[in-house]
Amino acid sequence: MQGRKPSPTVLKLITGNPGKRALPANEPQLKAIRPKAPRHLSQSAKKQWQVVARQLADAKVLTALDTHALALYCEAYERYQQANEQIRKFGVVVKAPSGFPVQSPFLAIANKALEQMTKLMTEFGMTPSSRTRVSTAGNADEDPMEAFLRSRT
């Protein structure tokens, strides 16, 4: 998807809906939680889950629907670590069977994992610039307009 990411409805309400476009009628309101790591994650990915899930839950960004995306991030993180370990061990350039120097295949794996991690980090607001485009899940039972009006007093 190209262009600017859509603003959350809550933010549009707070700012007075500057675009004057119709607001979604049935936008899901999800409660922020700290889910347990999925069983299928590797040990290293589970360790990363514990660190990142705690931070995202404290920021009220993580919901139950986000567990799959966070699991993908954690597995990409582990894949990057494994590939980077092999790069440190064998170097960025290795000898091909023909004897000529070639780029290490682990470099391509590490780069792909970094690309996947960066995309998922952006979705969760884990980079400085993407943090400005992420809203918290907040309290699903609370009316956004009531929260806004209460904050103005």
Image (cartoon, rainbow, N blue to C red):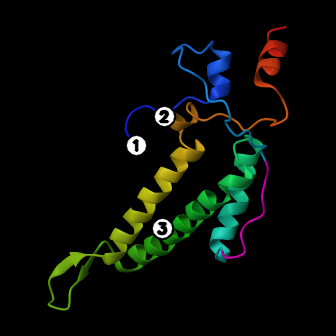
According to the picture, the residue beneath numbered tag 3 turns out to be: 80
Q: Quadrant of the C terminus?
A: top right
Q: Which residues are magenta?
A: 33-40
Q: Is residue 82 above or below residue 19?
A: below
At label 1, the amino acid type is Met
Q: Secondary structure at mark 1?
A: loop
Mark 1 and mark 2: span between their CA atoms?
A: 8 Å
At label 3, the amino acid type is Tyr
Tell me: 68 left or right of 35.
Answer: left
According to the picture, the residue beneath numbered tag 1 turns out to be: 1
According to the picture, the residue beneath numbered tag 2 turns out to be: 5
- Image location of residue 11, percent across then percent down: 64, 23
Please tell me how crowded label 1 is: few (under 14), some (14-19), or many (20+) other residues with Cα within 10 Å: few
Q: Nearer the viewer, mark 2 or mark 3?
A: 2
Q: Find out whether the residues at labels 1 and 2 contact each other: C-beta distance under 8 Å.
A: yes
Tell me: 11 left or right of 35.
Answer: left
Picture quadrant of residue 3: top left
**In front of the other: 56 or 27:** 27
At label 2, the amino acid type is Lys
Sequence order check: which comes first, mark 2 or mark 3? 2
Magenta-span inclusion, residue 34: yes
Tell me: 86 left or right of 73.
Answer: left
Q: Main secondary structure of the magenta part?
A: loop
- Image location of residue 59, percent across then percent down: 72, 40
Sequence order check: which comes first, mark 3 or mark 1? 1
